Amino acid sequence: MAIPAMLLAVAKRRALFRVVAGVVGVLVPVLIVVMCGGLAVVAGAATGSTTACLTTPSTAADAAAPLEAGLSIPSGSGRRVVVGAAQLAVARAYIGVGKNLGVSDDGLVVAIMMSLQESGLRVLANPSVRPSMNYAHDGVGSDHDSLGTAQQRPSAGWGSVTELMNPIYDAEAFFGGPNGPNHGKPPGLLDVPGWKSMAKGNAAQAVQRSEFPELYAQWEGEATAIVAALKSGTQLQACVSGTGVGSLPVLAANLSHLRRDLIRHAEAGIGGAYVWGGTAFKAWDCSGYVQWVYAQAGISLPRTEQWLVGKSTSTPLPGDLVVQNPDGPHHWGHVGIYAGGGMMFSALNPTVGTLLHPVSWNSGTKYFIVLKGN
């Protein structure tokens, strides 16, 4: 009788071990998301008035064609919303369709908020829906069979693949109403009773029925600035082409070869996609990007909380760590690499990916030295 009892005890211990291992397996990626996802969707979300450059190379068949410059739009806070050419075309499609339908400015803002959250104002194909890859697109998504600028699903009755890869149709379907292509099934914004009295994020959710309803509201500042500028014909400034919003500051002549190597590798990552928990080249989150850059220079950093191996400094040099968005004692939600001249490299968020941008786009900035010397 003792042997079965012993076997039972071992079985219980093994079951407990499996539970603990499962919990750890879930917690590790969650901690990574918390680390880099504090910034998650847009720089300066707390102010609701600034975003990174949304210029993204097209993955259409003619991707070799020169990329148009985007536009820099004034916002209420004095900081600027910078929108790339592809995103600008999508925004104009929504605003044009909305104006033709007599949609109020509030409704136009709801539509732009929705598309900023769903696709970054881009036309997204989906490898799971093979025919969509044959249409001109600005990127790819992977959420079920969601397509286009609003990430609507053919299987949910929103339209055909051909229709959903067209921003004009996406706008018509999102607004809906008596003349909408779906005739209220599924309902568009104009089919939602009382949408005008809802908070704008809630109005977007009433149409989209997202699993993350709270995320639309964070785009209201950006969407308001975009609608105001494009609807009024405000004079807009040209944005830098490509995936960055500035040029690399001149490096000091006495900067070490190691720091120069770090900056060179950081530049190589510009244009990379933001993937939560990712560590692969150009498919990383903020700490995954930093870890990759340092690894190319022969320096091993932890997967997260990389500042713990460094020393705080108030006089950073190019190649030092930048941490931002404090979310606890000696803990920050975002990490990047200082480029000098008030600029930094970082995998900023899922919409804009990896780019060179001003340090001032985020709050609570601290610097840490991981290297020695110049």
Image (tube, grey):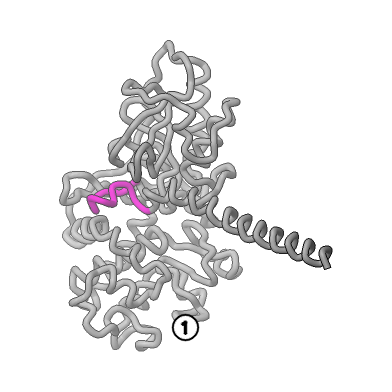
Q: Amino acid at mark 1?
A: Gly
Which residue lies under the disc numbered 1?
A: 157
Q: Which residues are magenta?
A: 41-52
Residue at image x 35%, y 87%?
184
For this orientation, the residue located farthest to the front is 1
Up/down of 130 relative to 256, above or below: below
Q: Is residue 99 magenta?
A: no
Residue 195: image quadrant is bottom left
The N terminus lies in which quarter of the figure? bottom right
Q: Which image quadrant: the C terminus?
A: top left
- Label 1, residues with CA under 10 Å away: few <14, some 14-19, many ≥20: few
Task: Please state if 10 lies on the left or on the right of 231 as rendered.
Answer: right
Q: Is residue 14 above or below residue 74?
A: below
Q: Residue at x 28, y 83 (%)?
A: 192
Q: Is residue 221 above or below residue 65?
A: below
Q: Nearer the viewer, residue 127 or 372?
A: 372
Name above or below for residue 97 compared with residue 63: below
Q: So how many labels did they put on this image? A: 1
Where is residue 157 shown, x and y percent of the image?
47, 83
Q: Residue at x 44, y 69 (%)?
A: 151
What percent of the width, then of the height, locates residue 323? 38, 36
Q: Secondary structure at mark 1?
A: loop
Does residue 92 appear in the picture of this structure? no
Whether residue 262 can be seen here: yes
Q: Is residue 42 magenta?
A: yes
Query: Is most of the magenta stretch helix, strand or loop?
Result: loop
**Does residue 151 appear left or right of residue 325 in this picture?**
right
| Viewer-closest of 91 and 357 | 357
x and y, in percent, of residue 342 in the image:
31, 29
242 vs 142, nearest the viewer: 142
Give the residue displayed 36% in from the left and 50% down from the top: 84
